[in-house]
Image (cartoon, grey):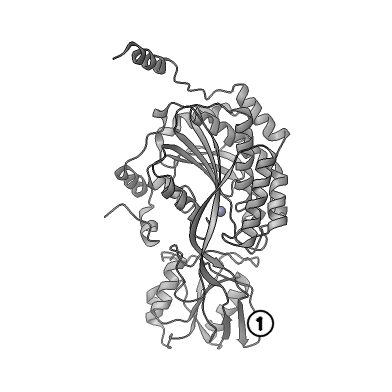
Amino acid sequence: MSRFLFAAMFCCLLSPHVYTQPNDTWYNLVGSAYIDNASYEMLGRLCDEAGGRLMGSAANDRALEIMMEELQSLEIPARYEEFTAPGWTRGNDIVRVESPFKRTLRAAALGYVEGSEVQATMFYAAGGHRPVYDSLSTTIHGKIALVTQERIQGEDQLLRYEVIDIAAEYGAAAVLFINDKSGGQVLCGVSNFEGRPSRIPAYSITYEEGKWLQRLLERGTEVAMTISTESKCSEVVSSNIISTLPGRSGKKIVIGAHFDSWDVGHGGVDNGQGTAILFDVARLLTRFSPNNRHTLEFVWFNGEELGLWGSRKYVEAHRQDPILAMINMDMTGTPRGFNAMGFNELIPMLERIHASLKGYNLDRGVTSNPWTNSDHMYFMFEGIPTLTLHAHLEKSMYQHYHDFGDTFDKVDKKYLSDAAAVISVLGYELANQPERAFPRYTQEQIKTLLIEHNLEDRLRRQGEWKFGD
Ligand SMILES: [Zn+2]
């Protein structure tokens, strides 16, 4: 062993740079997050000037341009990274009751729905399970299934993809999903996770109109409907936006948020909030912590709502990159704590940060409960430690997500500062930890982590279980 190498190793052992104590950088990051709040105005432009940012749409392309302009104006270097993915365009779809009286329903086609006109009567299929169809005395073929999204006691709730497949198997012509919450919300979502055209048209309808139809059917009243679907699937070229702040080690920490939103609203909260917080985090770290041990990569993922396309493609394209950890922000509000997502080795560091941020109400502490179906999922599958924030959103923010009411007026300016302050401190700390703080999990360890946290069943059902039997 050379004397140099020995000295270098000794140095490493003596000075592991485990800060996790407030220093001048912390004060700069937190102070500027509140004093400057650079993200609120930017988000206002995104929502109000571009509209709902569905991947592949003109609105999404316009929003990408606005974000790029805004990043450039703050001298934050950024680039597009293109990818192709299955896209989908919402057409002028009509879901209309013809009898007992005419009424056009408030309805939203699920992503990847296309199809021709359906004129048929309707039947009530409860939660959409097979035994319901088997027990129906009338013929199902060519009719429209009305399915509730409310939890039915003693029954496992099916995923919407499963409901559609079962209905198609029994010959139904379309499915209408009754939203489980009242208040006129239609909950947008996708009809399947693979981005393939849905087997039959499927729509989300409101609780109020759905319950009305359910009552009619339960009373034996015939309900006739017309559904005309102009929505269409097509491959699209879209982009993630990436900003890289190079570090010394050549390894990197990814901080991500999805940029796209559903089209019926403007994506103010989902995920305008994550988009805006990440914007400010990139500004804060570029300005106040330009020299770090590890590279920080800020990624605005596109196409999350249609099936995590941007993060899937990023993980595919960067499989060889030495990524140490990933932080994901999806509908992030004011911080309440940290989630180590099953990567328990990160807990002590998170606890030190948690204990040092005394002015925050981080009452949910540091937990370690992984969840799936947002942009961290494919990083997690690769064994990369992922982190999320526990955060609080107002009820009004949840009430409108994936719907018409998800607009800029729902965004809380202070929440953006709260989260930008905490996430920038977290990003700074991660970027300066020794590499050993981030153990990469093997496929076997990830499999165990997912099984231990009861995620296997859900992943199998959506066709995302890649860890063998
Ligand atoms: Zn989201």
Determine whether 313 is above or below 402 in the image. above
Whether residue 46 is visible, yes or no, is: yes
Give the class, few, some or many, for how many residues have Cα within 10 Å of label 1's Cα (few <14, many ≥20). Answer: few
Q: Residue at x 37, y 37 (%)?
A: 440
Residue furthest to the top in view is: 3
Q: Which residue is mark 1?
A: 103
Disc 1 residue lies near ligand 1 with CB under 8 A: no
Q: Please identify the quadrant where the N terminus is shown.
A: top left
Determine whether, in the image, residue 202 is placed left or right of residue 407: left
Determine whether 440 is above or below 289 in the image. below
Q: Measuring from the top left, give residue 34's x and y in whole percent.
A: 70, 34
464 or 291: nearer the viewer: 291
449 or 190: nearer the viewer: 190
Q: Residue at x 45, y 66 (%)?
A: 153
Q: Please identify the quadrant where the C terminus is shown.
A: bottom left
Determine whether 392 is above or below 96 in the image. above
Count of numbered circles on the image: 1
458 or 149: nearer the viewer: 458
Determine whether 355 is above or below 8 in the image. below
Determine whether, in the image, residue 73 is placed left or right of residue 16: right
Q: Residue at x 43, y 76 (%)?
A: 167
Q: Quadrant of residue 436?
A: top left
Q: Quadrant of residue 363?
A: top right
Whether residue 400 is visible, yes or no, is: no
Q: Measuring from the top left, give residue 445's x and y in whole percent.
A: 32, 42
Amino acid type for the residue under numbered disc 1: Arg
Q: Quadrant of residue 282?
A: top right
Q: Measuring from the top left, give residue 312's x and y in whole percent.
A: 45, 52
Q: Residue at x 39, y 52 (%)?
A: 455
Secondary structure found at label 1: strand
